Amino acid sequence: MKEPVNFFPTQTSAATAFHISDEAEACAAVLVACLRASEIYGMTENSNFYTSIRSRNIFKGHDAMALIELAGRYFEQAGSPAALIDAAIGAIREQTRLPLFCHCLDVILSDGVVTPQENRIFVYLKSRFNVGEELAWKAMEVLLAKNQL
C-alpha cells in the first residue's frame, strides 16, 4: 500500500526553501503536486496528467517527459505538495492561475473520488491561487460532470 503524503510537513529544511523560476516548470510542478496528493493513484490520474502536459499551450516547446521528470525531482526536493506549490507559485502569472487551477481539479477528479488529501490540495490551491469559493465549486461541478461521460 502506498504511504500517505504528508501534505503539510512539520519541518522545513534549507533544502525545501527553493523557488521555481520558469512558468512551464512551475505549472508542471503544481500538476505533479496534485497527482502525488492522491491516495488512490492510478491510470486515470496518469492519463489526465500526461494529457495536460502534452497538450496545453504553456508547455509548447518543452519536452513533456523532461518536464515531468524535472517536476518529479522538484517534488522530492520540496517534500510535500504544499511546499512544491509554494516553490512554484511565484513563477505562475495571474492569468495562468485559474486555468491551471481547473487543470489541477481535472487531475484530482479524474477517478471520480475526492480523497481527504485531494480535498486538502483543493482548499490549498484555492487559497494560493486566489480563486473565489463560488468559482472553485462551479469548476468542481463542471469537471465532475465532464468526468462522468
Image: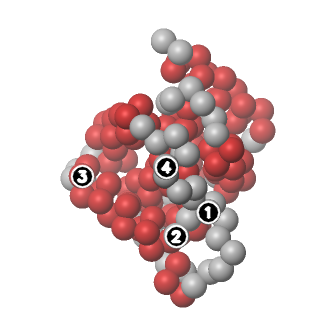
User: Can you identify the residue that label 1 sits on?
Assistant: 6
Q: How crowded is mark 1: few (under 14 residues within 10 Å), some or many (20 or more)?
A: few
- Where residue 83 appears, x then y in whole percent? 58, 68
Of the image marks 4 and 3, the number of the one nearer the N terminus:
4
- Residue 110 in sight from this viewpoint: yes
59 lies left or right of 97: left
Secondary structure found at label 1: loop
Residue furthest out toward the front: 1
User: Can you identify the residue that label 2 sits on?
Assistant: 79
Q: How crowded is mark 2: few (under 14 residues within 10 Å), some or many (20 or more)?
A: many
How far apart, in angstroms, are the residues tagged by discs 3 and 2? 21 Å
- Where residue 24 appears, x then y in whole percent? 38, 56
User: Can you identify the residue that label 3 sits on?
Assistant: 65
In front: label 3 or label 1: 1
How far apart, in angstroms, are the residues tagged by discs 4 and 3? 26 Å
In the image, 90 versus 107, the foreground residue is 107
- Where residue 71 appears, x then y in whole percent? 38, 60
Residue type at mark 4? Met
